[in-house]
Amino acid sequence: MPGLQSGNQPYHVTLRTADGFEVGLVAVAPEKNGVAQPHEFEGTLTPVDATEEFRPGGIPREFADFSAGAGYSYYDPRVPNGFAWAKNVITYIPHVAVPSGALTEVALPAGTHAEIRAGFERSGHLYFSTGRYACKVSGGTAASASAVADFATIAGMSTSVTITSTTLYLGTAYWGGYANGTAQPLVSHVVATDTFTSGATCAGWQIGSWFGVDGEGNWDQWMIRTVGTGAGYKITNSATPLNDTVWTPGSVTGDDVGDPGYPVTKIVTSRQAPFMMKPEGVFIIQRNGVYRPNITPYWEDVVNATNGANAVIVQGRMYTNVLSDLDMLQGLDGQLNDQPFSV
């Protein structure tokens, strides 16, 4: 403890525990006739027990209990001021620590030999498609995945079906795919019970959902699907998307988008609108159900069946594959992107 200082200058007190932990205190010395007087600190000091889980004062400590989900430690009252650290974690989201290494591999169902095309997370489980199967990772430490659906067993589905897309709409998951170049029946998936229902003749190849405002100012969750080379533009707030008649347009074949010789490779949705990725360009479906012609006409010089198969929107810009390049689209409100922007 340093000596007291004269006048109204502060003096410093450092408390040091038996294990070397230091707490610094600052106080203003009382003065009498120009002489600093001893100062009393109210309260008592309680020794820190070795079994305590944290130290006072918001000192960071190691935290490894994520049983209540990601970000649990940040709001845990046992961690003062929300400071914590953990070993072997992924910290790509601020204030959230996600333990790594729990899931190292997934054994796919025998005979699939197909890449993973689509997936989502729901109720603590990971669902994804591979070939004609929908798989489910049943636990954070699972080393394999159980097939919750073999789409060949669902009425009207082909044994050669490939599930290419999935989306969540009004609390239910939907799966779309194709077989031998033909869109297969759209399938609904009640996640709570893992019950799958075929749409019979309501086919869907690529599907997607998003929240949008229509021309009358109504805010709804929308869903869009492609049918081979055509598209059923949207279904709005309907509980029966397996019925063709509720779609716009209400047609089994849909309306052609772009060159009918090429199918849609992916649907990417944003807050503004859904984007249909095709080998020859990117097409926007407006809120009134009308598609805007190709906003990337330069893709027509590098037409490839995989153009747009992978795309993501980050901070208002779309990044997507085109032939052997990664293209960035800067205008996503219907603007013409007439020059490639390789990144």
Image (tube, rainbow, N blue to C red):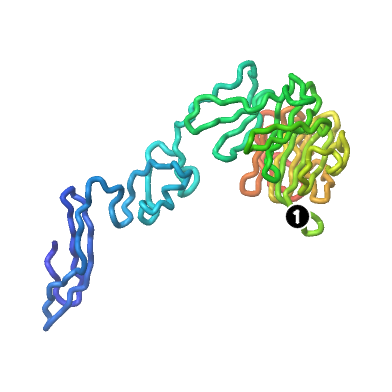
Left or right of 18 in this view: 135: right
Give the farthest residue toward the top: 111
Q: Is 41 situated above or below 228?
A: below
Residue 97 vs residue 317: left or right? left
Secondary element type, mark 1? strand
Q: Residue furthest front?
A: 193
Position in image of residue 278 (x %, y %): 77, 34
- Name the residue rendered at 72%, 48% in the picture: 332
95 left or right of 269 in image = left
Q: Is 176 placed above or below 328 here?
A: above
Q: Residue at x 22, y 63 (%)?
A: 25
* 338 versus 229 height, above or below: below
Q: Quadrant of the C terminus?
A: top right
Q: Position of residue 115 (x, y in %)?
A: 63, 24
Location of the N terminus by quadrant is bottom left
Quarter residue 299 falls in = top right
- Disc 1: which residue: 213
Q: Position of residue 225 (x, y in %)?
A: 78, 38
Examine the image and state in which quarter residue 197 appears. Answer: top right
What's the amino acid at mark 1?
A: Val
